Amino acid sequence: MKTKLSGKFWFTLVIFSLIGQVAWVVENMYFNVFVYKMFHASAGQISLMVAASAVSATVTTLIIGALSDKIGKRKIFICTGYIAWGISILSFAFIRVDVIHFLLPGVVATATVGITLVIILDCVMTFFGSSANDACYNAWLTDKTDETNRGSVEGINAMMPLVAILVVFGGFMFFDLDNQKSWITIYFIIGIAVIAIGILGFFLIEEKKIVTSSNQNYFQNILYGFRPAIIKKNPILYFTLGAFAIFGISIQTYMPYLILYYEKALGMSNYVLIMAPAITLAAIITAFYGKLYDRKGFKKSIIPAIIILMTGYVFLYLFKDTGLVFLGSLLMMTGYLTGMAVFGAMIRDYTPRDKTGLFQGLRIIGQVFIPGIIGPAIGAAILADAATCVNGDGTTSFIPNEKIFMAAFIAAFFIWILLIWVFRLVDQEHVDLMTEDGEHITSRPWQEYPRPQLKRDSYINLNGKWKYAATYKGHAPSVWNQEILLPFPPQSILSGIKKFPNRYKYLYYQREFILPENFVKDRVILNFGASDQITTVYINHKEILTHIGGYLPFQADITDYIQKTNTITVKVKDTLNHSLPYGKQKSKRGGMWYTTASGIWQSVWLESVSRDYIKNLKITPTLTDVTIEISSDMVSKAESKAESKADSKAGSTASSRTIKIKTEYGVIEKIFEGNKIVIPIENPKVWSPQQPYLYEFEIKTEGDRVTSYFALRTLSVQTVENIPRLCLNGKPYFFHGILDQGYYSDGIYLPASPAGYEKDIQTMKELGFNTLRKHIKVEPAIYYYLCDKLGMVVFQDMINNGLYSFIRDTAFPTIGLTNITDWGFLRTKKVKSNFKAFAKETIEYLYNFPSICYWTIFNEGWGQFQSDDMYDMIKELDSTRFIDSTSGWFWQKKSDVDSYHIYFKSIRVKKSKRPIVLSEFGGYCLKAEEHSFNLRRTYGYRFYKEGKELQEALNGVYFGEIAEEIQNGLCGSIYTQVSDVEDETNGLFTYDRKILKVDAEEMKKIAKGLKI
């Protein structure tokens, strides 16, 4: 929630910022005019004056900022500093040409002494001004604001330099700046105004309590921001300060000479009349620009500012026509001011809250010290050969030229180099969030049997601590200096590594194991739940298997490689190759793209089987019977080979099998030959979310025994009252669903334990949902078992591969361009073949889970190709489930449903010959700050500040839109989404699953209203 600031604060902000900036404008823009006109200063002398002032400001801010933090006070420094600042400004009235000339006759002597006195007094004035304004007033602003209002405050604060310029320009129009008396009057007016503000501050400024440490060392505090450990801890702050310094160098290259350029080079004696409108417009733009930062963040606000600034430089360099100079000045001033606002807000946001005074010195280094020394020096060097004019006393003065703007443009170009680093760091920035299960993680997680539909008594779980290394070398390291907790990916907190391996690196895992006595039957099988992306397995340093893919289980027969003590070594390379399914993983996460999950991310385990063992089951139910097919393997030890599960072939055997099925009425026992049996079920109990009844059974062969389960349920499309409907068990059913992306704050692709899955499923069911759309991810088998057991329908996505195109796949459909044939989508032969193979293996892996009712082939055009052919292929593999060929848009001819995604407009669907599913909608955001992955960025579609507002919006869209469309053929809806995911804050749960944002009773009422 945005923190509201008082009217008194805003008034104080305006008058202190304005008067302070008026004083600085006079110093920064008119002291050079003063010494130029009164003492004929050269470009080099002006550069020296600016540099000396910059040094004074920096040293002062470092010392006073640390002192202010040390004693925990700001107000006394601000008020007394402003008073002393005003007195020092008054003192300039006494630096008079006539007095100096009377004491030291001679034009050169008068000029030299006058310039020297101005430089010295300028440093004194800067000391007081920087103490009051830069060190303490700016720190006070940081103390009083937070990230919800800082951009707006900075917008006003940064607008003041140009407002001050406007005030000063307007005021100076009434003075003859070639006349010494005018300068005396100016210094008296400004000095008295600054003194008055200092006195007023005692009544206006409300001191913010600052927590200080009694054992703080004052001199250590002065150097606090320069400590390597502090720099390493705050990389974004320091890179931003570096970019800000280059920004300032660009500005200071021309700023000390700007008025002289207008007046002397362009002959604009009325430059104020030209500049005033430009300044006014720039100030208005900047007043609103701070809000852009608050809403869109640093990247989207600084890029336009720098582009505008550099465009202004181009105009000022190329043109001398009054109109074009005005336009160039407007662009330059707008870019300058908006850039100051954005950099200022960014630096404040990344300044540690309890160290604001200590970091003000660093701010001034970036804003004043470096620019004040380097910028004017560059300008002076550029103007070294500038044309000159002869003054009335016979001396000469330089005439600034347009080259200073080209130099400024070149300097600004280098800002982009540091900004790229800032953008990268911000994109990767996040807060570590732990789930409740993650906070109590054990050294041996995920000990549960990982294959609930093919369970046998032989089981050794290998999860836990493994040796780990990430290297560019393609062989195992000689020294292992890290440990990783499996089955969590190395990017995750729970893994203990929490690092993002370069995609060109190899990840190595290693551990030893000893098989217990009597464990080995005939064969030993090593199983991997999943490992992303190219995995090579070694047993006792002998390569036995390479598996390609990141989401499906694979196994290897390691019988011939077993010794007494055994070493498993696993090499993984995660290339994020787009020809392979990769889902929503991205090396540069952000927005709707998430952190990668490289390497092993599911359970690793051993089992021992006989030579003739059941390798797989295929279970096909109806409402009254079940068909069970067996895939077996019968290989002698001598013929034993390592093989991927995905490549295994169904064997055959003539031995008899026994099956026992538990029912409410007793046990059904059958003996059968061959690989297939159809078993009628008397008094059947069908499966549904309301009654998730599971039949448990066991199958015995000559050398094996496995337990499993099935459910009786059917899926069909039927016409009811002239409207096509999706039917569950022969009856129309509304699939009230929610998007489930399967990301967890501490484990990324995996919760800390299966209880994490159960919490998600059970909570969504308690809210009234009956369906989860498993979005672009395949989960461990335990997830689907829990959906079967708890009664939650699953709409299962295939995982996308191929390149995603924002223009084609998102922008065009958003504006209605969806009638595109997918034969025109260019996909390589490799992309197509990989997707087809993965789709086939996914269906084989998930076929037996009754909760899965719906396959989604392509999502929003991403990776889409020949969807009609893919529909035929999937239908041939599984004719028992619904198929959504093209979820969202780019529909072709073949699909079981019309599938809509609607986010930015009212939900309206057209009656169709096919059932209609709203497969994505909503995405309403509510950010819980203390439970948010990214405090500074938010991604979503509509934004709310309170849970009550969010709930009202949900009630409105469900009762006012979703329920109304059921009569038009809507058969299901999928709200986005179960939980926040990284930058996305549109979940019903926070990312750490600690806060449920909605009212459970209200959600139940919604569910009751969604029936066919």
Image (cartoon, grey):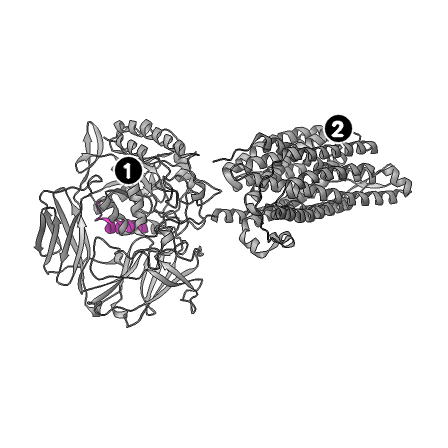
Q: Amino acid at mark 2?
A: Met
Q: Amino acid at mark 1?
A: Phe
User: Can you say which quadrant of the picture contains the C terminus?
Assistant: top left
Counting from the top left corner in percent of width and height, residue 985 is at 41, 40
Residue 885, above or below 964: below
Task: Choose between 161 and 663: the one closer to the eye.
Answer: 663
SS assignment at label 2: loop
Task: Choose between 126 and 722: the one closer to the eye.
Answer: 126
As drawn, is 733 to the left or to the right of 13? left
Q: Say the numbered circle drawn on residue 769.
A: 1
As drawn, is 30 to the left or to the right of 653? right
Q: Is residue 982 magenta?
A: no
Task: Choose between 660 and 717: the one closer to the eye.
Answer: 660
Q: Say the numbered circle drawn on residue 173.
A: 2
Q: Can the viewer see residue 393 in this picture?
A: no
Mark 2 touches mark 1? (CB < 8 Å): no
Q: Which residues are magenta?
A: 832-850
